[in-house]
C-alpha cells in the first residue's frame, strides 16, 4: 500500500507493507542510508531519528505509525540550527572512531539541544544512555555536546 | 615485513590527477591509521593534507601487509610510508639539484612545492614524481624529517562525512541489480539441518525470493531488504534441525588444568617446546585470575557484498586481512587466486576477528549460486552475538616467592586458554577454509584445523605473560586448551588482557602485604627508565587530585607496557561501589609513552577507547550459553558499558621524539581492568579475580567474605 511520510521537510509517497519498520523504508526505499541499523531491538540507538522533535528509534516501530509526523533523519539534521552546531562540535572534538554510532548520536544530541539550552554532564550522560558506542568515543561525544550547547 | 614485500617507493606513494596518493595494506577500522599515514606523508613531503588521498585497500593493488592487528599498523605501514616518503624527499631534491641547479640544501619541500630558496623557482612535487624512475627502491634507513612540535595535525579522515550520515559503510552499498540476503542459522554450533518444509520453500520462491542451501548452510535472497528479513524468519520456522548432543555445559575454569593442556615454556616472551620445571615449592602468594568468553560485539553486524560474474568473484568486505581472506575463499570454492578480488570497505569497529570474514565468505557462497547478481549479505544482531568467533575464556595462575623486604624473588605464571588464532589464513589442513564458519556446515564440510600453539614472541595467550618487572627467577608456562566449548579467535589485546589484569592485581596485593604504596612497590621492581617516568608523571597527576574519601569510594592504579615493547601506560582510577554492588567510574588519569607521537588526537582517542573497552569487559561482559545454544544474544543479555558510566579523563602523553613510534591501540585495556579491580578493593576490601566485576559477583563475594 502507499503511505505518505514527511521526512526532512518533504513529503514522500512510499509503496510498502504497513508493518515495515521505518528504518527499512528510509534506507531501502528512500535510499537515506545515514540512519544505521545496529540491533533491530531498540537497544543501541544507532537508528535514532527525530519524530516531532523527539529522539525516536526507527528499527522496530512500523512505518504506518509515522504518518502525519515530522521525521528528521541525519540527512536533514543540518537543516536545523541545533543540528549544525552539534555536527560542528563533533568534528571539532573528533567525537567518533569507526563512526557507526555517530549518526544516531548526532541526532540524539540535536534532540537534546532542541529540548534544553544547557545541561550538566550527568544529564547528558543519562540522555545518551540509550546509545551504545563500542569504540569508546563517549568522552569526546560528551565534550561535543557541551561545546554545542555553549555555542548556542 | 611491509618493505620486504613492497620495496618500491611507488608501492607506497604515487601521484594521480595532481594529488599524492598513499598506499597501504592496513585498513582503517576507526583506529585512524589512514589519518596517521596522511600525517606522515605530509610531514616528510610538505604536501598539504587537502592534496593527499589514501588508496582503497584492494587485493592485487595494495601492499600485502597481512592482517591489520596487534597494534602494528603504525610500526609497519607507518614506518614503510615514512621511509618511502623520506627516500622520495631525498630523490626529489637530488633530481632538482642535478637537473635545475643549486645545492641540495637550497631546495625545500613545502605547500606541495619543491622550491629553490634563492631564485624562488617552484615545481609541483606530484609533477616531479612523474619524472622519477617508477622502480626506485625505498631506502629503509632514509633520514626522517626532523620532528617539529608545530606540525598541525591532520583532520580525522571521514569524520565530516560520519556526522552528516554520508560515510559509506559496507551496509550502505547499493549497486544496480543488487539483492539482499540473510542466512538462517542452526540453533547452535553442533546442530545440523535435516530438512526444510518444501511448501514454505516453494511459497518463498513463488513470491520471488531465492532459497539457497548447501548442506546445513541455508540462506534466502530477495530484492527488498525487509521482505528478505521476513522470508528468513519464515524459512527459519520451516527448518527441522538435528540438535545432536547440544553445546557442552563445561565449567571452563574448572577445565583449565595442566593435565588437560598442551604445555610450553615461555622464555623471553617466546614459547619453547621444552620440559616444564616443577612449580615453586613454597610460594608466599598464590592467586588465579579469570576472564569469561567475550564477544567483539561490533555495533553494526557483519556484512559483505559479493558478485560472481565473468569468472571473477568480486567481494567488498570489512575484513582486517583481505589477502589471507582471498586465499581462504579461493580454496573454499576451488577458484584460482586471480578469480577472487576483495576490496576493503569499512564496517563498524571490530576490535579483532569478528564475523567480517565469515560474512564475506557467505556472501561469496550465495553469489556463486546466483551468477551475475550482486548480493549484499547482512548478519542480524542475534547472529553477530551468537556466531562471531569469541575471545577465549582464560585463566592466569600466579605464584611468587618473596625475599626479605617483600622483594619478589621468584615467579611462576601459568596461562590457560583456547586458541586466539582463528582467523582464516592459509596453513596445513586447509586451515584458511576450515576457519570460515559456514564451511563447517556445507554438504562437503571443511572441518576446523586443530589449533597449533602460537609460537610468536608475545603472541596469543602469552602476550604480556612475561612480566615487565625485574624478577630474575621466572617460570612462565603457556597451556593451550583446544576446543573447550566455543569457536575462538583474536580480540583486542589477546592474552594481555588477562595477564596484565593478573600481574597488576598481584602487585597491588603484594604492596598491601608489604605495607607500601602501590606506586612505590612497583617502582622498586622496575628498572626501565621510561616506565619510571610514566609512574612519576602518574604520581604527579595523582597528587593534583586527592584520592576520593566518601563512603564506598576507592582509587586503584596499574601499569603495563604492551607486549613489553610497545606503548607504556600508567592508569589511576577513582570509583565508587554502591550498596547494590554496582561500580560507578568517576575519574581516570592515564599517562602514556608511545615514543614519537604521530597523531596526538588519534593516540588519545585510542587510549580512551581502549580504557573504556577494558572497563566494559571488567564490569559487564560475559558470553553465556546452555545446552540449547548461546543465551547472550542481544545487548540486554550481553550488557556493555553505556554513557551513564563514563568517567572523566585526564590524559598525559609523554612525547619522546627520539624514540620510534609504537602502537597504542591495545595498550590501555589491560591496565584499565586491573586499576578498576584495585580500586574496587580499595573501596570495599573485596579482591575480584574473575571478570566481570558485576553487581552479582561483588555481592556474592561480599557475602562469602
Image (spheres, coloured by chain):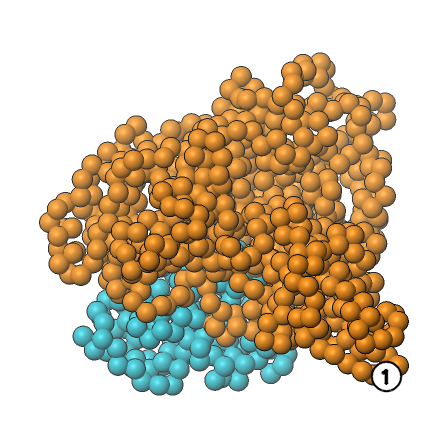
Chain A tint as drawn: cyan
Residue B477 lies in quadrant: top right
Q: Is residue B571 left or right of residue A139?
A: right
Q: Looking at this view, name the residue that lies furthest to the front.
A: B99
Q: Nearer the viewer, residue B285 or B698?
A: B285
> Which chain is in orange here?
B
Please state the chain letter of the residue tagged with numbered disc 1 in the rendered image: B
Residue holding disc 1: B119
Q: In the displayed structure, does residue B596 sit left or right of residue B227?
A: right
Q: Quadrant of residue B245?
A: top left
User: In the rendering, at what x and y percent does residue A111 appear?
Assistant: 48, 75
The location of residue B658, given as percent across then percent down, is 84, 54
Residue lying at the far left in this picture: please name it: B199
Q: Position of residue B422 (x, y in %)?
A: 49, 38
**Figure check: A101 above or below B392:** below
Asked which secondary structure carries label 1, the reply is loop
Observer able to see residue B385: no
Disc 1 residue crowd, few under 14, some 14–19, many 20+, Cα 10 Å: few
Which residue is pictured at 41% across the width and 78% down the height? A72
Q: Position of residue B446 (x, y in %)?
A: 36, 35
Residue lying at 82% horizontally and 70% vertically, measured from the top left: B98
Is there any visible trace of residue B274 in the rendered image?
A: yes
Image point (33%, 58%), residue name:
B310
Residue B436 shown left or right of residue B668 in the figure: left
Amino acid at each position: 500500500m502507499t503511505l505518505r511520510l514527511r521526512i526532512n521537510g518533504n513529503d514522500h509517497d512510499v509503496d510498502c507493507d504497513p508493518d515495515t519498520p521505518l528504518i527499512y523504508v528510509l534506507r531501502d526505499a528512500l535510499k537515506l542510508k545515514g540512519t544505521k541499523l545496529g540491533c533491530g531491538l531498540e537497544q543501541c540507538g544507532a537508528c535514532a531519528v527525530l519524530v516531532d522533535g523527539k529522539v525516536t528509534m526507527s528499527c522496530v516501530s512500523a512505518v504506518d505509525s509515522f504518518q502525519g509526523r515530522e521525521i528528521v533523519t541525519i540527512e536533514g539534521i543540518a537543516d536545523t540550527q541545533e543540528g549544525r552546531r552539534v555536527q560542528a562540535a563533533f568534528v571539532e572534538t573528533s567525537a567518533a572512531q569507526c563512526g557507526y554510532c555517530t549518526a544516531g548520536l548526532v541526532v540524539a544530541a540535536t534532540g537534546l539541544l532542541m529540548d534544553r539550552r544547557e545541561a550538566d554532564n550527568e544529564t547528558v550522560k543519562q540522555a545518551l544512555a540509550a546509545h551504545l558506542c563500542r569504540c569508546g568515543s563517549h568522552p569526546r561525544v560528551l565534550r561535543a555536546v557541551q561545546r554545542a550547547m555553549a555555542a548556542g | 615485513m611491509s618493505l620486504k614485500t613492497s620495496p618500491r617507493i611507488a608501492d607506497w606513494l604515487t601521484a594521480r590527477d595532481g594529488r599524492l596518493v598513499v598506499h597501504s595494506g592496513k585498513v582503517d577500522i576507526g583506529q585512524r591509521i589512514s589519518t596517521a599515514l596522511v600525517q606522515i606523508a605530509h610531514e616528510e613531503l610538505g604536501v598539504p593534507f587537502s592534496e593527499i588521498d589514501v588508496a582503497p585497500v584492494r587485493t592485487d593493488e595494495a601492499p600485502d601487509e597481512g592482517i591489520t592487528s596487534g597494534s602494528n599498523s603504525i610500526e609497519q605501514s607507518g614506518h614503510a610510508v615514512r621511509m618511502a616518503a623520506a627516500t622520495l624527499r631525498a630523490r626529489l631534491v637530488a633530481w632538482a639539484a642535478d637537473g635545475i641547479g643549486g645545492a641540495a640544501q637550497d631546495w625545500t619541500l613545502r605547500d606541495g612545492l619543491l622550491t629553490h630558496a634563492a631564485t624562488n623557482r617552484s615545481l609541483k612535487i606530484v609533477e616531479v614524481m612523474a619524472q622519477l624512475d617508477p622502480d626506485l627502491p625505498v631506502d629503509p634507513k632514509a633520514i626522517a624529517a626532523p620532528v617539529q612540535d608545530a606540525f598541525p595535525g591532520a583532520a580525522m579522515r571521514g569524520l565530516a562525512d560520519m556526522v552528516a550520515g554520508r560515510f559509506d559503510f559496507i551496509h550502505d552499498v547499493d549497486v544496480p541489480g543488487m539483492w539482499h540476503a540473510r542466512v538462517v542459522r542452526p540453533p547452535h554450533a553442533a546442530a545440523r539441518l535435516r530438512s526444510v518444509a518444501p511448501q514454505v520453500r516453494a511459497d518463498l520462491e513463488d513470491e520471488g525470493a531465492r532459497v539457497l542451501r548447501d548442506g546445513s548452510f541455508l540462506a534466502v535472497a530477495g530484492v527488498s531488504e525487509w521482505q528478505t528479513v521476513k522470508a528468513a524468519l519464515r524459512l527459519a520456522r520451516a527448518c527441522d534441525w538435528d540438535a545432536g548432543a547440544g553445546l557442552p555445559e563445561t565449567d571452563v575454569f574448572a577445565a583449565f588444568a595442566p593435565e588437560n593442556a598442551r604445555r610450553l615454556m615461555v622464555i623471553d616472551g617466546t614459547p619453547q617446546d621444552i620440559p616444564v620445571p616443577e612449580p615453586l615449592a613454597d610460594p608466599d602468594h598464590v592467586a588465579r585470575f579469570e576472564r569469561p568468553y567475550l564477544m567483539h560485539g561490533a555495533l553494526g553486524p557483519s556484512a559483505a557484498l559479493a558478485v560472481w560474474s565473468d569468472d571473477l568473484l568480486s567481494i567488498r568486505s570489512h575484513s582486517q586481512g583481505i589477502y589471507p581472506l582471498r586465499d581462504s575463499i579461493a580454496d573454499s570454492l576451488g577458484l584460482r587466486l586471480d578469480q577472487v578480488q576483495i576490496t576493503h570497505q569499512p564496517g563498524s569497529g571490530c576490535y579483532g576477528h569478528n564475523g567480517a570474514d565469515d560474512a564475506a565468505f557467505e556472501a561469496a557462497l550465495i553469489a556463486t549460486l546466483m551468477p551475475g547478481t550482486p548480493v549484499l549479505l547482512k548478519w542480524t544482531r542475534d547472529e553477530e552475538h551468537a556466531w562471531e568467533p569469541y575471545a577465549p575464556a582464560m585463566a592466569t595462575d600466579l605464584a611468587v616467592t618473596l625475599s626479605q623486604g617483600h622483594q619478589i624473588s621468584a615467579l611462576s605464571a601459568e596461562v590457560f586458554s583456547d586458541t586466539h588464532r582463528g582467523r582464516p589464513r592459509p596453513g596445513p589442513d586447509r586451515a584458511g577454509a576450515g576457519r570460515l564458519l559456514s564451511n563447517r556446515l556445507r554438504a562437503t564440510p571443511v572441518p576446523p584445523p586443530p589449533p597449533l600453539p602460537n609460537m610468536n614472541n608475545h603472541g596469543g595467550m602469552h602476550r604480556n605473560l612475561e612480566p615487565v618487572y625485574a624478577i630474575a627467577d621466572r617460570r612462565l608456562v603457556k597451556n593451550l586448551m583446544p576446543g573447550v566449548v566455543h569457536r575462538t579467535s583474536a580480540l583486542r589485546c589477546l592474552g594481555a588482557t588477562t595477564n596484565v589484569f593478573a600481574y597488576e592485581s598481584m602487585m597491588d596485593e603484594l604492596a598491601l602485604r608489604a605495607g607500601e604504596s602501590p606506586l612505590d612497590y612497583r617502582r622498586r621492581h622496575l628498572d626501565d627508565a621510561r616506565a619510571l617516568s610514566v609512574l612519576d608523571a602518574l604520581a604527579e597527576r595523582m597528587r593534583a587530585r586527592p584520592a576520593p574519601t566518601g563512603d564506598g569510594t576507592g582509587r586503584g592504579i596499574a601499569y603495563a607496557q604492551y607486549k613489553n615493547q610497545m606503548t607504556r601506560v600508567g592508569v589511576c582510577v577513582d570509583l565508587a561501589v554502591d550498596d547494590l554492588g554496582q561500580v560507578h567510574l568517576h575519574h581516570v588519569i592515564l599517562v602514556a609513552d608511545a615514543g614519537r607521537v604521530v597523531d596526538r588526537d588519534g593516540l588519545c582517542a585510542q587510549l580512551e577507547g581502549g580504557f573504556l573497552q577494558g572497563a566494559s569487559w571488567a564490569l559487564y561482559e560475559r558470553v553465556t550459553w546452555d545446552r540449547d545454544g548461546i543465551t547472550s544474544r542481544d545487548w540486554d543479555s550481553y550488557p556493555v558499558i553505556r554513557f551513564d558510566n563514563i568517567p572523566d579523563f585526564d590524559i598525559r602523553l609523554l612525547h619522546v621524539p627520539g624514540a620510534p613510534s609504537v602502537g597504542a591501540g591495545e595498550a590501555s585495556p589491560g591496565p584499565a581492568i586491573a586499576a578498576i579491580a584495585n580500586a574496587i578493593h580499595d573501596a570495599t576490601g573485596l579482591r575480584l579475580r574473575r571478570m566481570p566485576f558485576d553487581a552479582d559477583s561483588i555481592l556474592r563475594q561480599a557475602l562469602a567474605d
